[in-house]
Image: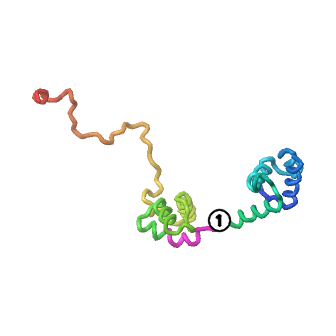
Amino acid sequence: MTTHYRQLTQGQRYQIEAGLSAAESQASIAKRVGVHPSTISREVRRNSTQNIYKAVSAAHESDARRAGARKFCKPATWLSHHLPVWLKHGMSPEQIAQRLKQEQPSRAVSHEWIYRFIAAEQRAGGELYTYLRHRRKRYRKRYGSHDRRGQLRNRVSISERPAEVESR
């Protein structure tokens, strides 16, 4: 079940202002307005000026925040043209994400997003995953075997050293 969030209306803000000026608790205001008490707390905290809540100024503050918020746009259209080129040149999704962040911050995406994009494209029959360095292979854990990395071949135990070494 999905939750649908709604902005507070101007009428609800006036009810909050009246309740606060009458020294009502935030819980009772929330019950009267028909929202969760945390909504009232958040509204008062975000939109009060000098510890005074006014409905008109709260609406202006909220509208200004929404106007200044970053708008979501799907990066798939632009990135779907450039991503194959970068992958064919041997760049990893981490490098691509970092390059976008530095050169084009407005079009920046995370490396996880790039991996998800490649996986979705693979499910649709694409071949972008073949340009990944590890071809989406997972790291193999070495639970049952002994770790043999960093060991010397034909090594001699210290107890088997020749006697002349001891006199040096």
* Quadrant in the picture for residue 119: bottom right
**Residue at horizontal 45 percent and vertical 58 percent from the top:** 135
* Quadrant in the picture for residue 79: bottom right
What colour scheme governs how the chains and residues are painted in the rendered image of this protein? rainbow
Q: In the rendered image, which quarter contains the C terminus?
A: top left
Residue extending farthest to the front is: 50
Is residue 82 within the magenta segment? yes
**Residue at horizontal 55 percent and vertical 65 percent from the top:** 108
* Quadrant in the picture for residue 120: bottom right
Q: Is residue 144 above or below residue 55?
A: above
Q: Is residue 27 left or right of residue 168?
A: right
Is residue 47 within the magenta segment? no
Q: Nearer the viewer, residue 124 or 57?
A: 57
Residue where numbered disc 1 is placed = 70
Whole-percent x and y of residue 162? 13, 29
Q: Nearer the viewer, residue 72 or 15?
A: 15
Q: Is residue 90 above or below residue 31?
A: below
**Residue at horizontal 85 percent and vertical 53 percent from the top:** 16
Q: Is residue 30 above or below residue 114?
A: above
**Residue at horizontal 44 percent and vertical 46 percent from the top:** 140
Question: Please, what secondary structure does the residue beneath circle 1 have?
Answer: loop
Amino acid identity at mark 1 = Arg
Q: Is residue 125 left or right of residue 8?
A: left
Whole-percent x and y of residue 42? 75, 51
Whole-percent x and y of residue 123? 56, 61
Q: Nearer the viewer, residue 164 or 80?
A: 164
Highlighted magenta segment, given as a residue range: 69-83
